Amino acid sequence: MPFAGFNMPINYKTGIINEHKNVRNHSGIFDVSHMGQILIENNESYLHKLEKYIPLQLKKLIKNRSHYSFLLNKDGGVIDDLIISNIDIKDKSYLYIVYNASRKKEDEEIFISCAPNTEKIYKKNCLFAIQGPDSINVLKNIIDIPNNMNFFDILISKYNNNEIIVCRSGYTGEDGFELSIPNEIAENLITHLLKNENTMLCGLGSRDSLRLEAGLSLYGHELNEKITPIEAGLSWALDKKRLEDENLNGNKVLSDQLKNKLSNKKIGLISTSKSMLRDGMILFDNNNEIGKITSGCFSPNLNKSIAIGYIISEFNTDNPIFCEIRKKLEVVKINNLPFIKKKYKKNGSIYE
Amino acid sequence: MGAYMSEKKYTKDHEWVSIENEIATIGISNHAQESLGDIVFIELPSVGNSVKAKDEICVVESVKAASDIYAPIDGEIIEVNNNLENDAAIINQDAENEGWIFKMKISDSNQYSQLMSEDEYRQFLEQ
């Protein structure tokens, strides 16, 4: 399937549901090399310029930690969501940023305007994720992972004397790691991981159903330039101090939104029949349109279709809510996000 | 055996049809099943409905997408495969036998002769 200019597999041999279950029960490996990865020198003037777009105190980021954040436009809308880390590579301090393939053009325009010598390391490094409860053991067999590494810790490890960037993170709600691997050794490293018979390659299909069960947002669905992080239910990821800073895009809009009632809210939905809930379906109360589904899929864990969407805040969630599925209205059930319990290894991180 | 026990024929919408005693059995092809991926739900047509060729008559939902199933020829729906209600994945396992979807009494056997043979369908897929 064509995806953000890449030809990507929806699934490998055994199918989406099997890949999904294998990640929940064992582990699975995702090739996410289509995503953007850049290095920006940790230089005060660059950081100051970047702080116009990124709602974190970039000068205070702790070394070897990653943070979920955003690039914001003038109205506080989300240009992209990203993971930003402070890491030393060959004795030099950098911000390492991973961002969406579909937003490379917009993001890189900003990165380069703030830091002209931004290095696009996705040209020489692949990005893979290994996800699931067994990830740690599968990965430990081939590279060094310290025992005290927590969720969103990031470090440099080595495989055959080549440096790889290892971050304990992912997009499935499971424990796991993302690995930035030099192109020359990527195939060897992944083949080595796949020697474990309980792991397998997984495609975009299971990546989507896993992240949806975990209630995680996807750019272009739950997030876009017209939605702020607060409207998307992600205010936990904003550094509240930065909202007082005139240098941050949309700081006034965001502070106001924190104080006042929002017009829309994000919800989780479960199908009450066997019908599938899909992106774009319209939601109704007894009479009127009240919202829209932004992502939907079949949940292998719940054996039912699940979805994320936005509805107007004044809707009383004790009342029945209907979804228009192929011209018929079906009752759907509101469910708290996430649909599954997340299993991150952590002791004190800013991530939820 | 009836007046004609047919070979299996195929439509451009990836349905298969076989005919026995003027009763057509219809399902989706193995190729369609493979491209849809895991099938999780099927909305079966209503027994007793009269349909025309190309009418949308039921829907197969897979993890990837919802796909309409069209009537391959004119006729009346006389039976549906109720086993699929509880386990639509039967279509993934055996699309062209156990995974049959519905049967219809056909009104015009000429329409059937105009469908593709297995060889023609294979060529159609390669195009």
Image (spheres, coloured by chain):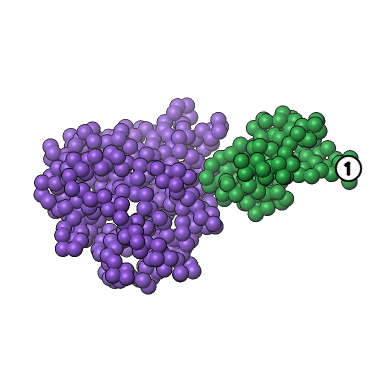
Chain colours: A purple, B green
Would residue B36 appear left or right of B2 to someone viewing this image? Answer: left
Locate residue A347, reporting x and y percent: 26, 63
Locate residue A162, reporting x and y percent: 29, 66
The residue where tag 1 is placed is B2
Q: Is residue A91 above or below residue A292?
A: below
Image quarter of residue B13:
top right
Q: Nearer the viewer, residue A144 or A223?
A: A144
Residue that appears at 35% across and 42% down:
A102
Q: Is residue A24 above or below residue A212?
A: below
Would residue A337 appear left or right of A75 to someone viewing this image? Answer: right
Question: Label 1 crowding class (10 Å Cα cut-off): few <14, some 14-19, many 20+?
Answer: few
**Residue ranking furthest to the bottom:** A141
Locate residue A152, reporting x and y percent: 28, 58
- Identified by mark 1, the residue type is Gly
Residue that appears at 67% across and 30% down:
B55
Would residue A220 appear left or right of B75 to someone viewing this image? Answer: left
